[in-house]
Amino acid sequence: MRGRRGLGGEVLRLMVAADGTRHRTAALRLGKYLAHAGVASRRAAEQMIAAGRVTLAGEICTDPARDVDDASGVAVDGRPLAGAEPRVLYALHKPVGVLSTARDTHGRRTVLELVPAGGLRLYPVGRLDADSSGLILLTNDGELANRLTHPRFEVPKTYRAKLSPPAPGPAALRALREGVELEDGPTAPARVRTLGDGRIELTIHEGRNRQVRRMCTAVGHPVLELVRTRFGALTLGALQPGEHRRLSLAEAERLRALTL
């Protein structure tokens, strides 16, 4: 399999398979390579490059956009790097009460505590509010994360919501399907179907803060429970709250294909 070019033109790294098999490393821009190797954040890595602290095969390189790979002899302060981190992608069933952030200044539990990072710098793809549960992705592939959450690619996400009674009528359902006026502008049309017992399934391709909850409140039916069941072609499946699994290369590629 070959790498694909990202939004910025760089060749993307391939994922590591769920069985741990490593595949050939494709080229990355130097600043991104250092960040993926765990040296520093992208911005700090670019500052290190500008300061002349990074060499390629013994020669100082001050261009953060220079394409490099594991054979380029990248070193920082004279210390050779073992290579960029392998790209991994996890599916997690986020429980209610857990924050979908990388860290919390108040010491509250986050999704990163539920997935074994193995020394890798994982971060969530998009967010679910603390009161919601369901499917969330975690990865150390920033390019893939950005593409999956970028409005340009309209990656669909499906939720199941239990609404406050009475059950939504035709007018409320029509409003959700046609788009709802919110304080930050109208929403795009959603796919909606009723499930009975005051529950609906709703699919959107936007990613605004607490969007599903705000849409339902706007049509007069605040959400009592909210679960994300699908992200693109990936479903929550049999994962129980707090459980996770590592995605296969094929699953990662199907997600990536949504953004091509």
Image (cartoon, rainbow, N blue to C red):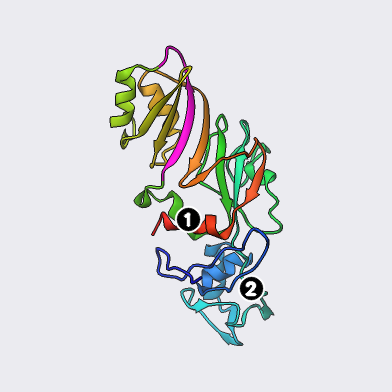
Q: Secondary structure at mark 1?
A: helix
The numbered mark at residue 83 is: 2
- Please indicate, yes or no, whether residue 179 appears anywhere in the rendered image: no
**Which quadrant, please, contains the C terminus?**
bottom left
Neighbourhood count class around disc 2 (C-alpha, 10 Å): few under 14, some 14–19, many 20 upward: some
Residue at 37% of width from left, 52% of height from top?
A: 153
Label 2 amino acid?
Gly
Q: Nearer the viewer, residue 156 or 46?
A: 156
Looking at marks 1 and 2 on the same chain, the residue that comes earlier in the sequence is marked by 2
Instruction: State left or right for residue 38 relative to residue 156.
Output: right
Residue 163 covered by magenta stretch:
yes
Q: In this rendering, is residue 153 above or below 46?
A: above
Count of marks, rendered view:
2
Q: Where residue 118 sits in the image (x, y, percent)?
A: 71, 57
Amino acid type for the residue under numbered disc 1:
Arg
Q: CA distance from mark 1 to mark 2?
A: 26 Å
Quickly name the residue at label 1.
Answer: 254
Q: Is residue 62 visible?
A: yes
Nearer the viewer's eye, disc 1 or disc 2? 1
- Kindly state the secondary structure of the residue where label 2 is placed: loop
Residue 151 pos. (x, y %): 37, 48
Using the image, determine if residue 67 lies above or below residue 193: below
Q: Give the magenta part as a residue range.
A: 156-167
